[in-house]
Amino acid sequence: MATEGVLTLDPRARRFLDLVNAATRGRSGAPELADLRRASAALAEFAAPAPEVERRSDALSNGDSAIPVRLYSPRGSARVELPGLVFFHGGGLVSGDLDTGDSLCAAICHLGRCRVVAVDYRLAPEFRFPTAHEDAFAAVMAVAAAPSRWAIDRRRLGVAGDSAGGNLATSAARRAGAAGVELALQLLLCPVLDPLARAPSRRELASGHLIEEATMERYWELYRVDGLAPDDPRVAPLRADFVGAPPALIHTAEYDPLRDEGALYARALEGAGIPVRHCSHAGLIHHFYALGAVIPTAQAALASIGAELREAFAGDLSWR
Amino acid sequence: MLDHADVVDSLIALARQFAPGLPASDALARSAPLREAGLTSMAAVRLMLSIEAAFAIAIPDAELTPENFATADSIEALIWRMRAN
C-alpha cells in the first residue's frame, strides 16, 4: 500500500483516542459542569513532566476584582529582563485554571526562554460574556503598563493561549493594538475562533477526537448571553478586523476539529498584512502540546514550538 | 511469577487511586461498580494505561469495553485473559 505523503494519525495518538473513547462510551447524557471541570483537571495528568522553572503567585486587577496570576521564570533569571508572554489556559471558558495550564506554561517558559504570566481569568457560567474577555484584556494592559514589575522587556511582550485561551489571547492582543498598545507576537495553540463552527473539520472530526462538538456547543451555551451574536467579533476573532493584531505563531493539529478555523485565521491575518507562521502538526490531535506523557511525538512538537518562539523573540525569525 | 493474590492486591490499589469512592473493604471493593465510585472517563484512561504498565499487557481495542472496566473483578478477568495469550 502506498502511504508516502498520506498523513495518518500518530499511532500513540490513536491509542490515546481509543482509550478515551472506550472510557466515554456508555456514559449517558450531556456532561455536567462538574464533569467538564473534573475532566479538565484529569486531562492535565497526561502532560510530560514539567521542566524546572521558578513560579511566583501574584495578582492583577480588573476594576474591583483581583485576578490571580502565576509568573513563570527560567531558573536563575531573576535580575535579567526577558521576553514575556501573558498566557490564557484552555477549557472552553468554563473549566481549567492555573494548575491545568501549569505544565504547558512551564514548558513554554523553559523552551522559549521567556517569562510567562498565566492569568486565572473568571469562568462561566458563574461569569458569562464578557468577563473572561475583559479579564484577559485587563491583564494584557496591566502587564504592558508595568513590564519592569515582572522583569519583562516591553518590546518583546506578547500573548499566548491554547484552545479557548487562544481566543482570549488574540482578542485581547487585537484590542490592545487598536488602543495603541503594540505587542510583539501572539502564540496560538489549537485556538477556538468560531462559535458557529462553520469550518469543515468541526463536522468531519465532530466526535471521537478528544473534544466533542456537543461539548463545544455546551461551552458556548454556558458562556453566551442573550443578545450576543455568535459571530460578534468580540467572541469570533475570524469576524474581526485585524487592525492592531500582532504577528502570529499559529499551531494547529491535523486531527483536531479546530484545525480549519486555525488555518483560516492564519490566512485571514496574512491577507491583512500581518506576519504569520502557521504550522499544522501532522498526525496529532487537539491539546497535543500537553499530552507528551502519552504521545511522545507531541513532546517533540512542543519543543519545536518553543524553538520557534525563542527565534521569534530573538528577532531572527523569517516571517513568511 | 504473578499469583492471584498479587494481581488482586495491586489491582485494588490502582483502582482506589482513580475511583476514590470504593468501599474500604477489599472484598467489597472488588465487585463495586467503578463509575459509581467516582471513576471519571479521564481517570478510566489513566487506569487503563496503569494496568497495561503494571501487568505488562497490551489491551486490544476489542477488549476496551465498558463491561471489562466495570469493576475490579472484571478487570482482573481481563488481565488473566491477556496474560494467557
Image: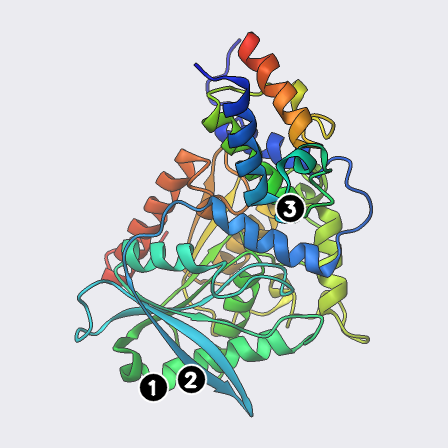
Compared with A37, A243 (above or below) is below
* Left or right: where A296 falls relative to B31: left
Which residue does the numbered mark 1 point to in the structure image?
A146
Within-10-Å neighbours for mark 1: few <14, some 14–19, many 20+: few
The residue most toward the bottom is A64
Specify the amino acid type for callout 2.
Answer: Ala
Identify the secondary structure beneath mark 3: loop
Would residue A234 be visible to someone looking at this image? yes
The residue located at (63%, 78%) in the rendering is A131
Residues tagged 3 and 1 counted as in contact (Cβ below 8 A): no
Between discs 3 and 1, the one toward the N terminus:
1
Specify the amino acid type for callout 3.
Answer: Ile
Which residue does the numbered mark 2 point to in the structure image?
A142
- The x, y position of residue A188, in whole percent, is 47, 57
- The x, y position of residue A147, in whole percent, is 31, 81
- The x, y position of residue B50, in whole percent, is 50, 33
User: Which chain does the residue under circle 2 lie in?
Assistant: A
User: Which chain does the residue under circle 3 lie in?
Assistant: A
Identify the secondary structure beneath mark 1: loop
The residue located at (19%, 68%) in the rendering is A77
* Left or right: where B68 falls relative to A186: right
* Viewer-closest of A152 and A235: A152
Rounded to the nearest whole Å, what is the CA distance between mark 2 and mark 3? Answer: 33 Å
* Left or right: where B81 falls relative to B7: right
User: Which chain does the residue under circle 1 lie in?
Assistant: A
Compared with A306, A83 (above or below) is below
Give the image quarter of residue B76.
top right
Q: Are marks 2 and 3 on the same chain?
A: yes
Compared with B6, A152 (above or below) is below
Rounded to the nearest whole Å, what is the CA distance between mark 3 and mark 1? Answer: 37 Å
Q: Nearer the viewer, mark 3 or mark 1?
A: 3
Compared with A262, A219 (above or below) is below
